[in-house]
């Protein structure tokens, strides 16, 4: 830092020094009466400061704006001047200063404020636009004249108008508000051109009128009908019209043509309309054709223009001509004799005139020359034809007659003497030539019933084909008695059909024919477009399109290929249309994105499939929502006009980017590198395109942008940033002036540059003097701009000096900063300020005033104060300002947040340093302010047809600025989209959004806490658009308004679900669902259809389907469902607005059906005579499984006999069977079916009886030895098979069964003997045994049978013959004594006998066959010997066998012969249904249970076993029981079955597990 030391002479002396000139005196401003835009200024020449005045500067302030230089070089000799270029009706102040070589002197005192008188506006309004609004009104819009041409305060506008092109007086309208820049001129003449002018006026008078613009009123409808209307009937179906146009003045527009109207006198609503183009030459004429014959019509003519139809002419009554009548009806024959018959008929339906009679003709069939004709009166409807030849076929015709002639004859053939009969059905239906809409049906006619066929009827099943589907009439062909081919028209493309036929004669209809094969018509493009196409505004750049999709019957093709195509375009442009494709055939709405804002579009829809596209729908129009401008104003420029002002100018936003009505502009400005956020200046109205920014910092570079805004919000700011610097000015004072070194004779002064340099600092001036000396005796020193300190020497000790420091820019020296210093060395830091106080009256929402009392300055003057602020509760101390004047005792603290608590503290700084901080103030809370932002995330959705639901999110807490009291909802009805489309976008320019809303809207206030974020607006008008904005408010006021949200009222989704849903099963694959519509008050519009959701009860996610009904029907058949399955059904209704809620699910179960095939069929333990067969449950049970049927037979006859064995197994738990009657090496064909309400399809497999290839050979040397307690079998291993032997099984054949069955399994391969306890065998039964070796290939060849072994044990003495003889004789004596006593006793009683229904001599023994709860049957036999065979099996483990009560066996080759002998009785099976039980013998049954009897009916080896079966008497019990050990599972046990030539297999009765013939009791 450079230190400048100035040495002053010790003696003071007087010298002449130049200084700044003084200010001019007595400045006076007066109006110039001869020139209205000028002011006369005069003044008195001032003291020149010892330097000649070079020039004067004249500044002015217009309307209290900052001062600006108006004249910068007024000659020094002047003491008055005329100020020109001023604007009328504005106020002005003036001031003058003189300039000499030293610089610019002080300004003079300001003149008093002077107002120039008003003058009429000097320019007309601009941008006049007129557009026809209705046929009697024109909307006129304009913008104000340029602001500089107002010449006063605008008071309003005068609009004048008159008929264009015609002289005459103008009519005027006075618009008394300058804010209103539009006018609707009404009560005009329809379709007439006017010229219109507008002028502005102020207090001085009317300004200049604008150039005339011309515009037509819109067309109207004609007000007079066509003239001289004449009409006549040309023939029986045509009327001719002749007329002249209405007078031209009554057409009220461009004649678009005429409409000819005709309607039957009896049916006025059946009007026929024919449009005729205008013909401007001669008399007009036209025809209406295809009218009904001989009918009275009223007819008239009207003229129409584009807006609509004019009045019709007076109706005239016209009769169409008579014509030949139609065919007579109901031709029939009665009283048919050999030579005569009676024919009768009814009047024609189409008389076409007055019936004058009937013609009856007849001829021999095929002989044209034999025709006879008889004419009858019009009242005769029957005639007896005589003179016929017997047994001859005649053709008989009957026709009605009018004056126009005989009509179409009704013909039939009949044979005399042979009464006609009902015809027979057609046959041999063949379909060919299938096209999308027709097919050819060829057939063989049925019996004609002895008369000709008068009509062929084709019926069909459409879409759904099946025995349960209904037949509908498709086509009828009449008067083709010999037809054999019919072309069936009007079919639906891509639809399944099945046809059948009837033929009809005069007697009646035949039965229906056999059905044809099912066909499917070919695909074709859709015939119709989607219906009910509506468009709604979705957003600023999107439109939402809704429609009713095509029903299934109108797809005309594969549903997967059906979709929709949307075409849209701007009608104001010639650009090609754009398209969108929707591939979902069920879609009902689509949002088209990427559109231009606030732009009208036309849209059409069509449906398409794989073949092609259908027709386009009628075009609909929609306009996107108003938006923010998408571009910035153009040609933005900025110019600094002073050190504190910048003038910005711009051009408007391009028309295509305005996106709405421009309400005004915002100028965004920010001091570069100084301001953290830009500030904004709002320019209301779209007519002002300039703005003067005032109050700016001097010589500061500003970043400037301009944007336009609409009622929706701000548009895009201009880019790039405009950079402009304000002009320089004299600088502010330097800051932080301190004296860090003070000696008795010198001081060092240090400073910082001015906070407001206002230009480029060129240097500093330090002036100082003794505080006690004259104020003008400063010692002055100038230093460079970079110097920041200076040392003054040769000062007087212990003296007070005044230092003055100022900076200099190009504009001169700035305001000085003064400070006092005492040349002493006794200094210290100051004491902190005290008594800090914030008066509550000085607290505002964003500022407060801090007061204090300075502390001791420590013998060194205080240079400045520093204020710090802390935001409660957890804020840090922040320095607010560190350059507060040393003289201040109060400070305004600004930029605070509303409704926030603060604490403040203060410190002082002198030349020595900083004081301590003062004590903190008490907490002070700023006042509340209006909320800084509106509610956000606002959504407005239709709730009912007359209400909307508004939802929002509260403002952020930091923007509430106080206690939120509630929200205010503003809403207004917008004009309809249709009418808005015809209005210019610049229809009106509201000055502000709030002004427009409060002027035109009703509003509701929602007083709520901040937690309430929903509200329902009710009682709105239907089918209207509404706009909604929200504000938040507190006790101070309202927040800014939110962006407006638009909603269409009148459409809302149904609020409730359909009612009274009923689900009824129809078939195994169909459910019928019926319901009632939602309550009328909840439908919210017309119900367009329903969505039926249905799914299987246990698997909704995997099976849910949805069927859409696009008609408001309340019944549907759900088809192709799974049999015997529980379904849940839920229904929702929908309208144009969307889907309503779904109903609660209702249940329904489809009927049962035949099951699917069993899941598998397997064979195990295959020996040469037995095997186990098992199968799996069907994957699709389709109902409750009742059982299974097993059928097996050899593939080739065995010994000349081919047997088919059928076994019915009841219940689903039993899926296995033991078969024991196989023949060695024979291949068998097995089939298994499951049964519910019917049998399902079969599962088939082949199996060959053993031994298997590669199995071991038969064991040898089988020997059975018997001891007192057991039997022992011994054998020798036979030949090994392909693989080593893995073990053995033992088979046994009891003497009372005769069939081999497995006795012991799983004997180790090392064993060659096996023992069994005699207790395990049945007493008195003889057994044979054989051994089978097993390896991996299967069961081998069995060994030779062992010798028969009896299980009889030694007889005890009480069974010896002699003991029995003694006992018998003793018993005989006792019996004789008893009989003798009874005879004596019975002589006095009458003997009564009781018949038992059976001869006592026939011994009857009941044997109960126990099946564990299955049907019980008993055997009635003449000679029945029951032997005890072996009971429990030891060690055998076979699969459980079915209880015979659960089986039914039959042979398909049963005969009543056995070995050629006729049997005396046949075996019958009677079955009683008993509830099944699964709690039969299991593996857990104890081995010490008493032996149970197995009754074996081996009747095939004894003819005496052919006996009749009858039901067992109650209470009978089986003599013996046996226990079967199941192979690893509990439940009913499988029995084996064997069949020979003739067998009926009976189930066992309760209490016995007796196997049937062929079923082994061994397990």
Image: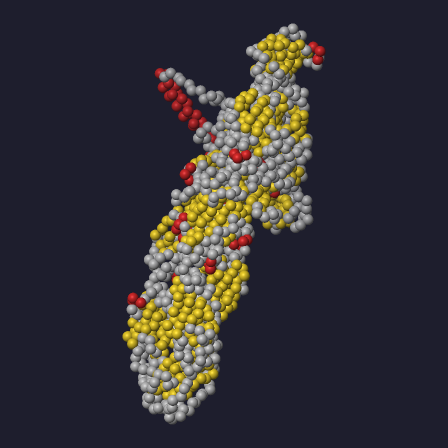
Instruction: Give the farthest residue toward the left.
Output: 835
* Residue at left offset 44%, top offset 84%: 782
Front residue of 1545/373: it is 373
Quadrant housing residue 431: top right
Counting from the top left corner in percent of width and height, residue 440 is at 66, 29
Instruction: Give the farthest residue toward the bottom.
Output: 10
Total marks in image: 0
Answer left or right for 1516 relative to 1384.
right
Counting from the top left corner in percent of width and height, residue 1290 is at 59, 43
* Residue at left offset 44%, top offset 68%: 82
Counting from the top left corner in percent of width and height, residue 1463 is at 59, 24
Answer left or right for 1074 relative to 392.
left
Counting from the top left corner in percent of width and height, residue 541 is at 53, 51
Position of residue 869 relative to residue 1052, above or below, is: below
Residue 1117 in view in this figure: no
Instruction: Give the farthest residue toward the front.
Output: 34
Answer left or right for 320 relative to 952.
right
Position of residue 520 relative to residue 215, above or below, is: above
Answer left or right for 442 relative to 1209.
right
Residue 835 in view in this figure: yes
Quarter placement of the C terminus: top right
Quadrant housing residue 109: bottom left
Front residue of 41/652: it is 41
């Amino acid at each position: 830092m450079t230190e400048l030391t100035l040495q002053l002479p010790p003696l003071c002396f007087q010298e002449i020094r130049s200084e700044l000139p003084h200010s001019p005196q007595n400045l006076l401003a007066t109006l110039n009466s001869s020139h209205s835009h000028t002011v006369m200024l005069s003044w008195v020449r001032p003291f020149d400061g010892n330097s000649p005045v070079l020039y004067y500067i004249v500044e002015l302030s217009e309307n209290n704006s900052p001062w600006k230089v108006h004249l910068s070089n007024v000659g020094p000799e002047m003491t008055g001047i005329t100020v020109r270029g001023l604007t009328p009706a504005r106020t002005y102040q003036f001031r003058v200063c003189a300039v000499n070589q030293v610089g610019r002197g002080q300004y003079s005192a300001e003149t008093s404020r002077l107002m120039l008188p008003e003058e009429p506006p000097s320019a007309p309004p601009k941008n006049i636009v007129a557009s026809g609004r209705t046929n009697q009104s024109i909307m006129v819009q304009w913008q104000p004249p340029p602001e500089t041409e107002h010449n006063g305060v605008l008071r309003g506008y005068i609009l004048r108008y008159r008929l264009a092109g015609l002289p005459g007086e103008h009519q005027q309208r006075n618009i008394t508000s300058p804010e209103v820049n539009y006018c609707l001129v009404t009560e005009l003449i329809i379709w007439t051109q006017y010229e219109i002018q507008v002028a502005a006026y102020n207090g001085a008078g009317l300004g200049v009128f604008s150039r005339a613009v011309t515009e037509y009123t819109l067309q109207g409808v004609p007000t007079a009908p066509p003239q001289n209307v004449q009409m006549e009937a040309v023939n029986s179906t045509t009327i001719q019209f002749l007329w002249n146009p209405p007078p031209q003045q009554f057409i009220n527009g461009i004649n678009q043509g005429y409409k000819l109207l005709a309607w039957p006198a009896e049916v006025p609503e059946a009007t026929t309309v024919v449009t005729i183009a205008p013909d401007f030459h001669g008399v007009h004429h036209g025809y209406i054709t295809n009218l009904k014959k001989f009918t009275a019509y009223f007819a008239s003519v009207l003229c129409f223009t584009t807006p609509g139809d004019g009045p019709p002419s007076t109706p005239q009554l016209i009769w169409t001509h008579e014509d030949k009548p139609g065919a007579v009806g109901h031709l029939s024959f009665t009283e048919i004799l050999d030579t005569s018959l009676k024919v009768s008929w009814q009047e024609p339906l189409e008389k076409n005139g007055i019936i004058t009679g009937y013609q009856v003709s007849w001829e021999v069939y095929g002989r044209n020359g034999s025709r006879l004709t008889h004419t009858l009166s019009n009242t005769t409807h029957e005639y007896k034809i005589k003179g016929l030849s017997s047994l001859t076929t005649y053709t008989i015709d009957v026709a009605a007659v009018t004056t126009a002639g005989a009509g179409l004859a009704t013909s039939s053939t009949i044979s005399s003497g042979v009464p006609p009969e009902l015809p027979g059905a057609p046959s041999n239906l063949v379909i060919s030539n299938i096209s999308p809409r027709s097919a050819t049906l060829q057939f063989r006619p049925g019996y004609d019933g002895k008369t000709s066929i008068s009509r062929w009827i084709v019926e069909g099943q459409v879409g759904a084909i099946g025995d349960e589907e209904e037949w509908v009439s498709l086509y009828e062909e009449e008067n083709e008695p010999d037809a054999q081919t019919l072309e069936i028209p009007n079919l639906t493309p891509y639809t399944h059909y099945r046809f059948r036929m009837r033929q009809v004669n005069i007697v009646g209809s035949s039965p229906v024919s056999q059905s044809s094969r099912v066909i499917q018509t070919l695909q074709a493009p859709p015939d119709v477009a989607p219906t009910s196409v509506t468009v709604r505004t979705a957003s600023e750049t999107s439109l939402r399109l809704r429609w009713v999709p095509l029903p299934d019957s109108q797809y005309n093709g594969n549903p997967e290929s059906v979709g929709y195509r949307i075409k849209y375009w701007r009608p104001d442009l010639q650009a090609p249309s754009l398209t969108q494709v929707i591939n979902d055939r069920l879609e009902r709405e689509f949002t088209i994105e990427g559109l231009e804002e606030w732009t009208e579009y036309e849209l059409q829809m069509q449906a398409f499939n794989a073949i092609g596209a259908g027709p386009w729908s009628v075009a609909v129009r929609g306009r996107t929502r108003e938006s923010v401008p998408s571009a910035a104003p153009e040609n933005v420029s900025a110019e600094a006009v002073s050190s504190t002002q910048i003038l910005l100018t711009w051009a408007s936003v391009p028309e295509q980017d305005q996106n709405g009505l421009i309400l005004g502009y915002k100028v965004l400005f920010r001091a570069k590198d100084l301001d953290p956020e830009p500030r904004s200046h709002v320019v209301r109205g779209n007519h002002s395109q300039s703005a003067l920014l005032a109050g700016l910092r001097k010589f500061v570079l500003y970043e400037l942008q301009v944007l336009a805004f609409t009622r929706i919000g701000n548009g895009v700011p201009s880019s790039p940033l405009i950079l402009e610097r304000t002009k320089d000015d004299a600088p502010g004072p330097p800051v932080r002036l301190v004296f860090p070194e003070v000696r008795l004779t010198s001081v060092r002064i240090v400073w910082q540059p001015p906070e407001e340099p206002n230009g480029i600092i060129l240097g500093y001036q330090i002036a100082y003097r003794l505080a006690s000396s004259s104020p003008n005796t400063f010692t002055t020193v100038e230093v460079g701009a970079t110097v920041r300190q200076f040392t003054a020497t040769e000062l007087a000790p212990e003296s007070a000096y005044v230092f003055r420091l100022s900076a200099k820019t190009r504009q001169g020296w700035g305001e000085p900063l003064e400070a006092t210093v005492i040349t002493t060395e006794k200094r210290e830091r100051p004491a902190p300020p005290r008594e800090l106080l914030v008066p509550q009256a000085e607290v505002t929402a964003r500022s407060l005033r801090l007061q204090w009392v300075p502390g001791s300055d420590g013998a060194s003057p205080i240079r400045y104060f520093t204020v710090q602020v802390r935001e409660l509760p957890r804020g840090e101390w922040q320095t607010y300002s560190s350059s507060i004047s040393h003289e201040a005792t109060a400070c305004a603290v600004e930029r605070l947040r509303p409704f926030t608590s603060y604490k403040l503290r203060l410190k002082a700084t002198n030349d020595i340093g900083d004081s301590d901080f003062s004590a903190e103030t008490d907490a002070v809370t700023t006042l509340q302010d209006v909320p800084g932002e509106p509610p956000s995330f606002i959504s407005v959705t239709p709730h009912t047809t007359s209400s909307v639901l508004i939802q929002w999110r509260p403002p952020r807490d930091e923007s509430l600025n106080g206690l939120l009291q509630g929200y205010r909802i503003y809403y207004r009805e917008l004009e309809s989209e249709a009418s808005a489309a015809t209005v210019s976008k610049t229809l009106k320019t509201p000055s502000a959004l709030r002004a427009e809303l409060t002027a035109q809207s009703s509003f509701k206030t929602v007083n709520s806490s901040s937690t309430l974020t929903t509200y329902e607006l009710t009682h709105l008008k239907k089918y209207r658009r509404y706009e909604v904005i929200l504000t938040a408010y507190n006790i101070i006021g309202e927040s800014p308004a939110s962006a407006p949200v638009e909603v269409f009222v009148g459409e809302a989704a149904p609020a409730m679900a359909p009612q009274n849903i009923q689900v009824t099963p129809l078939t195994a694959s169909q459910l019928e669902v019926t319901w009632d519509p939602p309550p009328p008050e909840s439908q919210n519009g017309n119900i367009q259809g329903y969505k039926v959701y249905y799914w299987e009860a246990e698997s909704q996610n995997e099976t849910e389907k949805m069927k859409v009904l696009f008609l408001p029907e309340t019944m549907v058949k759900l088809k192709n469902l799974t049999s015997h399955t529980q379904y849940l059904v839920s229904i929702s209704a929908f309208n144009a607005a969307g889907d309503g809620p779904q109903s609660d699910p209702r249940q329904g179960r489809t009927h049962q059906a035949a099951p699917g095939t069993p899941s598998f069929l397997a064979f195990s333990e295959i020996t040469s005579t037995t095997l186990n067969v098992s199968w799996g449950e069907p994957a699709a049970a389709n109902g409750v499984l009742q059982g299974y049927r097993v059928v097996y037979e050899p593939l080739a006859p065995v010994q000349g006999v081919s047997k088919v064995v059928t076994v019915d197994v009841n219940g689903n738990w039993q899926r296995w069977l033991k078969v024991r009657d196989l023949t060695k090496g024979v291949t068998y064909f097995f089939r298994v079916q499951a049964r519910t309400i019917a049998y399902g399809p079969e599962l088939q497999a082949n199996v060959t009886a053993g031994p298997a290839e590669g199995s071991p050979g038969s064991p040898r040397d089988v020997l059975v030895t018997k001891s007192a307690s057991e039997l022992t079998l011994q054998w020798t291993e036979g030949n090994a098979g392909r693989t080593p032997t893995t073990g053995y099984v033992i088979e046994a054949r009891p003497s009372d069964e005769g069939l081999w069955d497995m006795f012991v399994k799983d004997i180790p391969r090392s064993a060659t003997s096996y023992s069994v306890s005699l207790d395990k065998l049945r007493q008195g039964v003889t057994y044979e045994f054989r051994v089978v070796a097993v390896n991996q290939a299967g069961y081998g060849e069995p060994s030779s049978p062992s010798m028969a072994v009896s299980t009889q044990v030694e007889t005890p003495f009480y069974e010896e013959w002699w003991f029995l003889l003694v006992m018998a004789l003793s018993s005989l004596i006792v019996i004789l004594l008893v009989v003798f006593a009874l005879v004596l006793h019975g002589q006095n009683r009458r003997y009564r006998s009781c018949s038992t229904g059976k001869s006592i001599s026939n011994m009857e023994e009941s044997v109960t066959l126990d099946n564990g709860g299955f049907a019980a049957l008993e055997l009635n036999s003449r000679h029945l010997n029951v032997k005890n065979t072996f009971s429990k099996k030891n060690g055998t483990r076979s699969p459980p066998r079915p209880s015979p009560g659960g089986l039914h066996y039959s042979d398909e080759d049963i005969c009543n012969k056995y070995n050629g002998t006729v049997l005396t009785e046949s075996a019958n099976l009677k079955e009683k249904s008993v509830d099944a039980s699964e709690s039969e013998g299991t593996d857990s049954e104890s081995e010490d249970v008493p032996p149970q009897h197995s009754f074996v009916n081996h009747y095939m080896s004894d003819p005496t076993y052919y006996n009749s079966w009858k039901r067992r008497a109650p209470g009978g019990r089986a003599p013996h029981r046996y226990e079967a050990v199941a192979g690893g599972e509990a439940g009913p046990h499988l029995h084996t079955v064997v069949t020979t030539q003739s067998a009926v297999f009976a189930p066992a009765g309760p209490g016995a597990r007796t196997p049937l013939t062929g079923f082994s009791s061994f397990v």
